[in-house]
Image (spheres, helix red, strand yellow):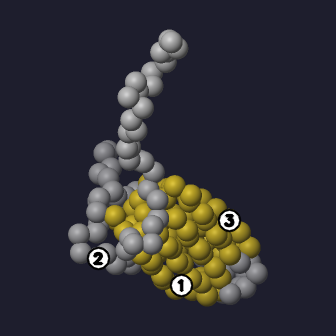
């Protein structure tokens, strides 16, 4: 006879558990957003990103963000929601942000800065899945 030890189940049954990390699956509703903008030399803009929601959906779980301009210049990108900054990146002509576990937001504001001395046209886009939770904005206590 082998002595039982540890915390395993004596009946060898399995337990089904849910993951707390959102996972994009093909049967979920896509969450996409797109916005174009123009930046003058040295200009910084705050741009509200329009987001569409399916019935009962209240947030986008964003897995990929892309900000690009039409010239090889340095741009700064910040992603804000509910008065909180979530991402700060810089790049030449393009900033690609991958978020492996997803970022759930109900509103998105892009702050973008053109560090060059020429005018550029740009575009923002994100992709993910829609969720039913209203996640942002959270009230800012002062």
Tell me the number on the disc at residue 90. Answer: 3
Label 1: which residue?
A: 37
Label 3: state its secondary structure: strand
Residue at the (64%, 62%) spot, across then down: 89
User: Pointer 2: residues within 10 angstroms few (<14), some, or many (20+)?
Assistant: few
Numbered label tally: 3
Question: Whole-percent x and y of residue 82?
Answer: 37, 58
Q: Quadrant of the C terminus?
A: top left
- 96 or 90: nearer the viewer: 96
Q: Using the image, determine if residue 100 lies above or below residue 96.
A: above
Please report whichever mark, 2 or 1, sits nearer to the chain's N-terminal start. Answer: 1
- 45 or 33: nearer the viewer: 33
User: Pointer 1: residues within 10 angstroms few (<14), some, or many (20+)?
Assistant: few
User: Pointer 3: residues within 10 angstroms few (<14), some, or many (20+)?
Assistant: some
Kindly report which numbered mark, 2 or 3, lies closer to the viewer in this rendering.
2
Label 2: which residue?
A: 54
Say left or right for 43 vs 74. left
Please report whichever mark, 1 or 3, sits nearer to the chain's N-terminal start. Answer: 1
């Amino acid at each position: 006879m082998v002595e039982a030890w540890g915390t395993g189940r004596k009946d060898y049954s399995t337990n089904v558990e849910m993951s707390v990390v959102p996972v994009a699956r093909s049967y979920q509703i896509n969450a996409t957003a797109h916005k174009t903008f123009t930046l003058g030399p040295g200009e910084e803009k705050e741009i509200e990103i329009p987001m569409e929601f399916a019935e009962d959906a209240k947030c986008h779980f964003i897995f990929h963000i892309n900000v690009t301009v039409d010239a090889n210049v340095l741009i700064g990108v910040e992603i804000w929601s509910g008065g909180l900054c979530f991402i700060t990146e810089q790049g030449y002509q393009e900033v690609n942000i991958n978020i492996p576990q997803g970022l759930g937001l109900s509103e998105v504001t892009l702050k973008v800065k053109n560090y060059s001395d020429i005018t550029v046209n740009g575009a923002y886009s994100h992709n993910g899945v829609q969720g039913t939770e209203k996640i942002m904005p959270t009230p800012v206590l002062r």
